[in-house]
Image: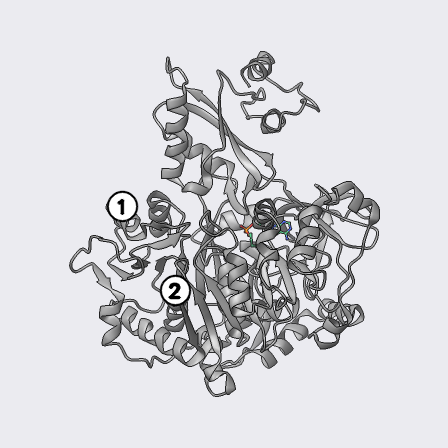
Amino acid sequence: MSQPTIESILQEKRLFPPPTEFAQKAHIKSIEEYKQLYEKAKTDPEGFWAELAETELDWFQKWDKVLDWQPPFVKWFVNGKINISYNCLDRHLTTWRRNKAALIWEGEPGDSRTLTYAQLHREVCQMANVFKQLGVKKGDRVGIYMPMIPEAAIAMLACARIGAPHTVVFGGFSAEALKDRLVDAEAKLVVTADGGWRKDAIVPLKEQVDKALAAGAPTVENVLVVKRTAQQIQMEPGRDHWWHDLQKGASGECPAEPMDSEDMLFILYTSGTTGKPKGVVHTTGGYNLYTHVTNKWAFDLQDTDVYWCTADVGWITGHSYIVYGPLSNGATSLMYEGAPRASNPGCLWDVVEKYGVTIFYTAPTAIRALMKMGEHHPNSRNLTSLRLLGTVGEPINPEAWIWYNRVIGGDRCPIVDTWWQTETGGFMITPLPGATSTKPGSATFPFPGIIADIVNQEGESVDGNNGGYLVVKHPWPGMMRTVYGDDDRFRRTYWEYLRPKSGEYIYFAGDGAHRDEDGYFWVMGRVDDVINVAGHRLGTMEVESALVSHPAVAEAAVVGKPDEVKGEDIVAFVTLEGEREPDEVLEKELKQHVVQEIGAIARPGEIRFTEDLPKTRSGKIMRRLLRSLAAGQEIAGDTSTLQDRSVLDKLRGGA
Ligand code: WT7
C-alpha cells in the first residue's frame, strides 16, 4: 500500500493550512481572528456569550443574568424565555428561507423527500397538536424510537415546541434497553415507526416497543406510529395510533411555548462507569446558543451549503448537528436512512453526488470501513461539490485522515476534527476551518469560551508535552446540567473525580490527552471504564451486567481490544457457574444474550472462558492485565497486588 504510516506522518509534522479561497469567505477568517475571539471569551465569558445570544437567537423575553454558577450547577440566561423550535423554524418563515430546503431526506431504498422550512414548520405543528391531543403537557417526557426519517426530527421539534422533553433512544438498542430508558425517564408517550430500513433489511421498531412495554414501562400511555416499512404489525386499540390517521385532523398551527431558558429540552442516555446508563440533561437557551454558534463557525455554515452529518438522531451528534444546530442556522440539513451495504457499498457517494453535498461529517470508524471497501467507489462518483469534511467520535488515526483528505476531499477540503461528548452538548476542541492549520490526528484548539486544560491526578496543569486528564475550567452554555434524577452522580462523576487544592470545580471529561509544542491538543481516548466500539460509547460494567444476568455466568470482566476498523472491540472474560462447561454453543448464546439486553452494538467480538479473574487482594478486577491479554501483549507493569498469581498463567494458557 502507498498509504503513509503513522510514523512517517509524525516525523513529517505536516501542517495543513486553510485554503486561501476558503478562508476569505469563511465566518472566521484567520488564526488572529480566532485568537482575538478566544481572548475576548476568556476575559469576559458572560459578555461574549450574551452578545452572541442577542445577535444569533430570538428570545421572547430577555434574561436578567447571563450566568449563575453554583458549582457544579449552572444556569445560563437566567429568566430568559425562548423556544428552540421557534428558533429552528418560525423565525425563518418571515425571511427568504421560508421556501428553502430545511431537510433533505434520502431513504435507503432510494425514496426521498425534501421539506422546506414552511413545510417542516407545518408538520411539526401538526405533530405537536397530536401530542397535546394524546394528553402530553409541558414537562411530560416523550420517548422517541425511530429510524432515520424526517418524522424523527419532526417529533423532536414537536416536543420542543410544547415543552415536553424528549428522550431519543437509538433504534439499534434492544427492547430491554429501551424499556430501561423509558422507565428512568417516566415517558408518557412513545413515538416510533413500524420499522426502518438498514442494510436491505427491516429493523422491526414497533415490535421492540411492544416488547419493551410488555416488560413493564407503566408510565407509557400512548404510542404514535409512523408508517415506514409497511410490514404487518400489532396495533393495540386505545394505546397505539397511526400518525397518518391523526395527522389528517391536526392543525398546522401551534404556537411555540415560551420556555424558561433553563427548562429541560431533552434527556439523552449515555454510558458511564456503572452498569446503569446516565440520563444526560440538556436545557433550552444555552444549548440552543451553543449548538448554533459551534455549528456555524466550526463548519462554516453558509446559506448555499448542503450539509450532511451521517450520525443517527439517537446520538448527541444527531441532536446537535442534524437537527438543532443546522436548523437554528437556517441551513439545509441532509438526513440519510441507510448505511453502506453489500448491494451498494458506494451509497454515501451517490448521495453526495445526487444532492451536491458541500459539507460532510462522519466518524473515523466509518472512514476506515470506507477505506477498506476501496477507492473505486468514491472515485467513480463526482464529489467535487464537497468543500469541508468533519470527523467525530474517537481519535482519528493519521492514515484515515490522509485518505479522507485525498480521496474524499480531493486535497482541497479542510478537515474539522471535533472533540466533544454527549455531556458537552457541542464541539469543544475543534479547528475553525478558515483559521486553523490542521495536523492529522489532532482536534487542534479549544472553541472560544472553552477553557480546556490538561491536568494530573491532583488537578494541577501539566505543561509541555506531558499527557494527563482533559478538563474544562469554566462553564459553557451547552454543558449538561445534571444526570436525570441523580444530582449526586453528576457531581461525583464529572466534578469531584479531580479536585485541585484550590477547591475549584473543574469538569473532567473522562479522556486522556496531551498538548504538543505548538499548543495543539491530541485526545488519546478514555481513561475510565468506557470503551468506544465503532464510535459507540459503551460502559464495561454495562456489558458485564448483561453477561452476569445469564444463568450460566458467575462473573464477567469486559475490556476493549484494538480493532483495525472499529477502533476497539469487546473482549469478555467469563467464569461460569458451578459445573457448567464452556463450549461454542454457550459462547454464541452469551453473545446473543448481550444483544438482547443492550443491542447489537454491544455484541462481544470475543468471549474467553476462564476459571478465575485476576483480582487485587481487596477483590478488584485488574482490568489493566486483561486489556494486555486481550491485545495479545506481554503484561507490563506491577502485578504485585495480584491476589493469586496462578490466575494469570491459567489465563495465558487458556487464551
Ligand atoms: C467520547 C464521547 C460527541 C459525539 C460523538 C461521541 C470520544 C469524540 C472525539 C474526537 C477523539 C473523541 C471521546 C469522548 N471522542 N470525539 N474528535 N477525538 N476522541 O459522543 O458518545 O458522548 O462519546 O468520544 O472519548 O469522551 P459520546
Residue 307 falls left or right of residue 428 = left
Residue at disc 1, CB closer than 8 Å to ligand 1 = no
Q: Which mark is residue 87?
A: none
Report x, y in % for residue 261: 49, 71
Q: Residue furthest left?
A: 237
Q: Which residue is mark 1?
A: 211
Which sits in the foreground, 175 or 40? 175
Q: Residue at x 64, y 61 (%)?
A: 389
Report x, y in % for residue 77: 55, 73
Residue 222 falls left or right of residue 18 = left
Which sits in the foreground, 514 or 276? 514
Which sits in the foreground, 143 or 306? 306
Residue at disc 2, CB closer than 8 Å to ligand 1 = no
Which sits in the foreground, 459 or 508? 508
Above or below 511: residue 106? below
Q: Quadrant of the N terminus?
A: top right
Report x, y in % for residue 306: 55, 71
C-alpha distance separating marks 1 and 2: 29 Å
Q: Residue at x 33, y 72 (%)?
A: 128
Above or below 177: residue 256? below
Residue 220 falls left or right of residue 655 = left
Looking at the picture, which amino acid does disc 1 mark?
Lys
Describe the element under mark 2 as helix, strand or loop.
loop
Pair 1/2: label in front:
2
Report x, y in % for residue 381: 58, 61
Looking at the picture, which amino acid does disc 2 mark?
Asp
Q: Residue at x 46, y 32 (%)?
A: 544
Q: Which residue is mark 2?
A: 111
